[in-house]
Image (tube, helix red, strand yellow):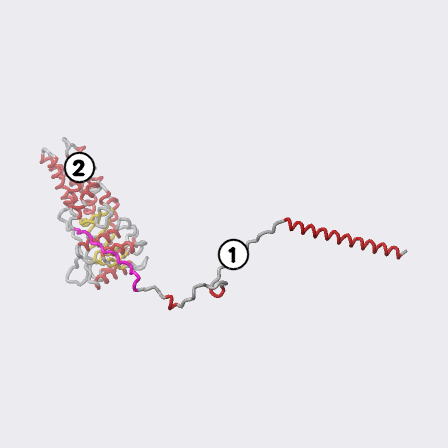
Amino acid sequence: MEIVILAVVIAVVAFLAICGLVITGRRKKTRESRAAATPAATTTAPPAEPQVGEDAETALEEPRRTIEEVGLPDTETAPAPAAPEIEIPEPSAGRLVRLRARLSRSQNSLGKGLLTLLSRERLDEETWEEIEDTLLTADVGVAPTQELVEALRERVRVLGTRTPEELRTLLREELLKLVGPDLDRTVHTETRGAVDRPGIVLVVGVNGTGKTTTTGKLGRVLVADGKSVVLGAADTFRAAAADQLQTWGERVGARTVRGPEGGDPASVAFEAVKEGTDASADVVLIDTAGRLHTKTGLMDELGKVKRVVEKHGPVDEVLLVLDATTGQNGLVQARVFAEVVDITGIVLTKLDGTAKGGIVVAVQRELGVPVKLVGLGEGADDLAPFEPAAFVDALIDGE
């Protein structure tokens, strides 16, 4: 009985083993047939990284050369950087006359307005008030306006009949008297006494009035008049002020002395005068910091610049730069600067852009010093010595 059971078990095991072999064979054939039916996938290998030197698979066709064989660029034949071309400024004498048309375009409304009012058949109180208003609007100032109106009233009364030509002559004479034809308007660049040093000119004023540009243009005026100039960039607080001044100097061959940004302005001013003395220059122009005039500490610093420079000798000229378009606010600036340094002359910029030419009279009265230079445009040679007669003619006659 046990032998029978054992035989049955062996038979079952043999049967199962045979079945397993058959199934495995069928699966293998199925996989092979599927693989034959499906196209093989293409794998793109990443590009080989470039190699150099001994790691390169392919040797360079070109034979290697030594450094002696390669050679170096010929430094002697390399072109040197071109030196900036030196400009020759136009003479300063008579500039205001040449720029008269530009001046009259902006100022002519004042002269024409006054002539129109004076030409009325009947000059009553209302007309004289209009004349006063015209003068005040032109920033002539209260006291000078009253003086002019009184003088005109008296002369018109004496004159009686008034032809246009007589009125023009009358107005010209009174305006010229108001502007001050006898004031000394020379920019003093000569040293006082037998001192072997250059003349020293300080340029002061609030930032935004064109102070640094005016310093550069004044350098051109002096070069045009045959003087050698050294520029001192003592405005160390305003970014690019020294660069701006140096560019102006390079255009006319003037050396610029500068210091680090934010450095001591008095030190730069001192070195500029020393450099000018060593170079036997005729004039040293010093562009000072022009921070807001309301800051006492900064104004004290301006006083320090002047004191340090005076260790070389007295300052020969202190020019205050004012923006003609600021009107009465410019007079406030003028008062504060005059308290710190002794102003000897005024430079009025942007006079071509305003019909308020009366500021010339007002600022002279305020400071008791003359307008010596006027700016009449953006051009390099648009800074002109102030000539009262040419100025008044531009006010009255137009182009």
Q: Earlier in the sequence, mark 2 or mark 1?
A: 1
Q: Quadrant of the C terminus?
A: top left
Which residues fall within the magenta stretch? Answer: 76-92
Q: Position of residue 179 (x, y in %)?
A: 16, 45
**Secondary structure of the residue carrying numbered label 2:** helix
Q: Is residue 89 magenta?
A: yes
Asked whether the viewer can see residue 89, the reply is: yes
Q: Is residue 118 magenta?
A: no
- Identify the mark at residue 47; answer none if there is no mark: 1
Query: As displayed, is residue 153 above or below residue 52?
Result: above
Q: Position of residue 367 (x, y in %)?
A: 20, 49
Q: Position of residue 70 (x, y in %)?
A: 38, 66
Q: Residue lying farthest right?
A: 1
**In-front residue for pair 285/74:** 74
Badge 2 amino acid: Leu
- Identify the mark at residue 39; answer none if there is no mark: none
**In-front residue for pair 88/293:** 88
Q: Quadrant of the N terminus?
A: bottom right
**Residue 197 occupies quadrant:** bottom left
> In the displayed structure, does residue 44 sit left or right of residue 395?
right
> In the displayed structure, does residue 164 sit left or right of residue 375?
left
Q: Position of residue 295 (x, y in %)?
A: 30, 52
**In-front residue for pair 20/220:** 20
> Label 2 to label 1, Cα distance in Å?
89 Å
Estimate how packed mark 2 is, as few (under 14), some (14 to 19) or many (20 or more) residues with alpha carbons within 10 Å: many
- The residue identified by callout 2 is 114
The majority secondary structure of the magenta stretch comes to: loop
Q: Residue lying farthest top?
A: 121
**Secondary structure of the residue carrying numbered label 1:** loop
Badge 1 amino acid: Pro
